[in-house]
Amino acid sequence: MNTGQESTKMDIENEIILLKQRNTIVDANKKWERSPIRIILVCLMTYGIVLLYSFLLDIGSNIFLSAAVPVIGFFLSTLSLNFIRKLVSKKVL
């Protein structure tokens, strides 16, 4: 092999290594997006923020129940969006 072909082969091998590294990161991000821990943390943070907001503005008579509404909405969206994604991917792909 001449040096030009060796250089091209090394470039391709380096590109493959970079793609594998990127794919590892993308896979980890996908797992995190779907992880139950993430969903629970977002629910707890949402509840806390809405509860604090409700206390500060003295909104409503049952602040604890009112703060649960956006949390329930988020949680339901994590369940239903996965179902919708599967339907869409079957029709689009």
Image (cartoon, rainbow, N blue to C red):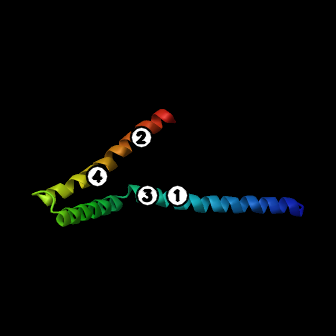
Q: Between residue 79 and residue 16, name the one nearer to us.
A: 79
Instruction: Determine whether the residue tagged by mark 2 lies in a helix, strand or loop.
Output: helix
Q: Nearer the viewer, residue 4 or 84?
A: 84
Which amino acid is tagged 1? Val
Going from the N terminus, do you reach mark 3 or mark 4 first?
A: 3
Q: Secondary structure at mark 1?
A: helix
Amino acid found under the numbered disc labelled 3: Lys
Residue name at image x 41 percent, y 57 percent: 33
Q: Single out the residue that lies furthest toward the left.
A: 61
Going from the N terminus, do you reach mark 2 or mark 1 first?
Answer: 1
Instruction: List x then y, in percent, for residue 53.
Output: 23, 63
User: Which badge, 1 or 3, is on the more N-terminal residue?
Assistant: 1
Cα separation, mark 2 vs mark 3, equals 16 Å
Q: Earlier in the sequence, mark 2 or mark 3?
A: 3
Q: What residue did someone put label 1 on?
A: 26
Q: Are marks 4 and 1 in contact (CB under 8 Å)?
A: no
Q: Which residue is mark 2?
A: 86
Distance between the alpha carbons at the discs numbered 2 and 4:
18 Å
The mark lying in front, picked from 4 and 1, is 4
Disc 2 and disc 3 in contact, CB within 8 angstroms: no
Which quarter of the image is occupied by the N terminus? bottom right
The residue beneath circle 3 is 31
Seen from the viewer's position, the closer of residues 31 and 85 is: 85
Instruction: Give, as a three-letter code, the residue at label 2.
Output: Lys
Q: Which residue is mark 4?
A: 75
